[in-house]
Image (cartoon, rainbow, N blue to C red):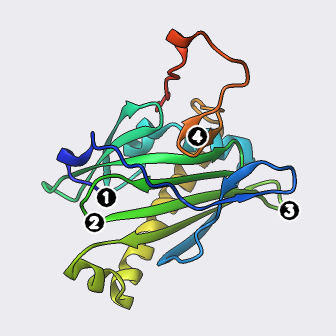
């Protein structure tokens, strides 16, 4: 996570990549994680995935997300908190495959994290959604984050938010919007080349 002053900072390091059988380079799933939580929702994968991409709707079901803003095509700024406390940080989407996978990383020099979410079809026609987080704090916070108590608290929060999303999308019955683009190494992929002045794609967060 990054403080507000860090939101505009560029980060040049990239997550590890792997090559699948078809020769497509994809982000390697987190080998180390502090949190992994799964929830099953009673809507098809496409519906669950499409709604998840509508980040601006998160405050409608989340107990901690108060706002989401688009900063750049693959960067969003999130405001979270409890009660009067607020914390604003930026994340970059580094990999995204429609109906399957989304990976992100925190930007800036403050305590950060990496995360990924997978969407898998269930035998009943619903969707299993799995979120994994790797906390990357610095200084004394690093010791606290690696404690079992901190991991349990984070896992409880993630599970609670997944349950909130489940209730939200099942109540809607269908997605309220979608972004169906693909991202590789932090860049939106274009199926057809665009004129130079139109190369920057817009990320519809909601």
Task: Reply above or below: 80 against 180.
Answer: below
Q: Tag 1 or tag 3, which sits nearer the N-term?
A: 1
Q: Nearer the viewer, mark 4 or mark 2?
A: 2
**Residue at the location (68% across, 17% down)?**
193
Q: Name the residue under label 4.
A: 51
| Local crowd size for mark 1, using a 10 Å CA cut-off: few (<14), some (14–19), many (≥20) | many
Q: Circle 2 — which element?
A: loop
Which percent across, then down, holds residue 197?
Answer: 50, 10
Q: Which of 165 and 197 is in front in this view?
A: 197
Q: Nearer the viewer, residue 78 or 21?
A: 21
Q: Tag 3 or tag 2, which sits nearer the N-term?
A: 2
Q: Circle 4 — which element?
A: helix
**Residue at the location (61% across, 69% down)?**
38
Q: Is residue 156 left or right of residue 124?
A: left
- What's the CA distance linking mark 4 and mark 2? 28 Å
**Residue at the location (62% across, 45% down)?**
96
Whether label 2 touches label 3, CB < 8 Å: no
């Amino acid at each position: 996570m990054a403080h507000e002053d860090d939101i505009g900072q560029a980060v040049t390091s990239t997550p590890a990549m792997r090559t699948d059988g078809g020769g497509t380079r994809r982000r390697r799933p987190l080998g180390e994680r502090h949190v992994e939580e799964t929830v099953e929702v009673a809507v098809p994968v496409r519906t669950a995935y499409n709604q998840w991409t509508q980040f601006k709707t998160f405050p409608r079901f989340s107990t901690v997300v108060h706002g989401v803003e688009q900063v750049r095509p693959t960067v969003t700024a999130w405001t979270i908190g409890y009660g009067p406390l607020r914390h604003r940080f930026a994340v970059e989407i580094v990999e995204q495959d429609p109906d399957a996978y989304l990976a992100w990383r925190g930007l800036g020099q403050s305590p950060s994290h990496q995360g990924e979410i997978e969407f898998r079809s269930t035998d009943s026609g619903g969707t299993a959604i799995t979120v994994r987080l790797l906390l990357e704090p610095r200084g004394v916070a690093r010791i606290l984050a690696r404690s079992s108590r901190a991991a349990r608290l984070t896992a409880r929060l993630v599970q609670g938010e997944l349950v909130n999303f489940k209730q939200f999308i099942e109540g809607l019955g269908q997605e309220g919007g979608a972004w169906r683009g693909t991202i590789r190494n932090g860049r939106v992929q274009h199926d057809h080349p665009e004129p130079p002045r139109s190369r920057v794609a817009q990320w519809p967060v909601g």
